[in-house]
């Protein structure tokens, strides 16, 4: 009879063990690569949400600064509406009406949306119902269906 520790019968066992170890290591490495990819995508999505939040805060601040024009409806714009022409209300020498300032604010804000967010567009709606405090609702969309919406008292 042959003993199990005979070198003739034990040949190749270590090669099979190495192959199994390589398969396990390869599967683990692929899992880590996938985890890295998911992390990068989540980081990008989070960055886009932060940018949308900052852009919403920017237009809300501009609406607050030009409240009379906002209450007159000059800041209302839908997402599919073309951006207004910028009348150039920047600088110390610029003298613009409240309506022109609203158009300038919206044009600049819309340009920022397109520059910062991939496929970014935005809508602003100033709600001024009788007997209720006015509010402004900002909706920002970008990418493949991402949406950020906030409503703030005016």
Image (tube, helix red, strand yellow):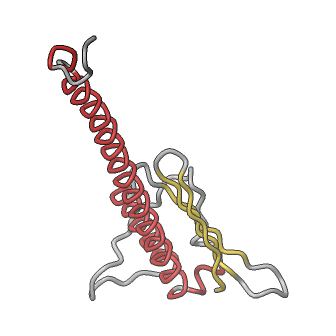
* Rendered location of residue 10, percent (x, y): 21, 20
Q: Is residue 32 left or right of residue 52?
A: left
Comparing 25 with 10, the one in front is: 10
The residue closer to the viewer here, 73 or 39, is: 39
Instruction: Find residue 131 and report its image quarter.
Output: bottom right
Q: Residue at x 37, y 64 (%)?
A: 112
Name the residue: 28% across, 11% down.
1
The residue at 41%/81% (across/down) is: 96
Q: Residue furthest front?
A: 1
Q: Position of residue 23 (x, y in %)?
A: 29, 30
Q: Is residue 16 above or below residue 31?
A: above
Is 112 in front, or is 100?
Answer: 112
Nearest the eye: 25 or 16: 16
Query: In this view, which residue lies farthest toward the top?
Result: 1
Please tell me which residue is depicted at 38% across the width and 64% down the height of the picture: 47
Q: Is residue 152 above or below residue 86?
A: below
| Residue 81 drawn above or below residue 24 | below
């Amino acid at each position: 009879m042959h003993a199990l520790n005979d070198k003739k019968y034990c040949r190749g066992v270590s090669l099979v063990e190495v192959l199994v170890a390589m398969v396990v290591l390869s599967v683990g490495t692929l899992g880590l690569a996938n985890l890295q990819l998911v992390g990068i995508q989540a980081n990008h999505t989070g960055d886009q949400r932060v940018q949308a939040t900052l852009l919403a805060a920017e237009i809300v601040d501009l609406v607050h600064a030009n409240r009379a024009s906002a209450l007159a409806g000059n800041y209302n714009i839908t997402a599919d509406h073309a951006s207004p022409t910028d009348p150039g209300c920047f600088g110390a020498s610029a003298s613009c009406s409240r309506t022109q300032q609203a158009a300038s604010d919206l044009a600049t804000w819309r340009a920022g949306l397109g520059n910062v967010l991939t496929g970014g567009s935005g809508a602003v709606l100033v709600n001024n119902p009788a007997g209720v405090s006015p509010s402004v609702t900002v909706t920002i969309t970008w990418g493949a269906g991402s949406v950020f919406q906030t409503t703030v008292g005016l």
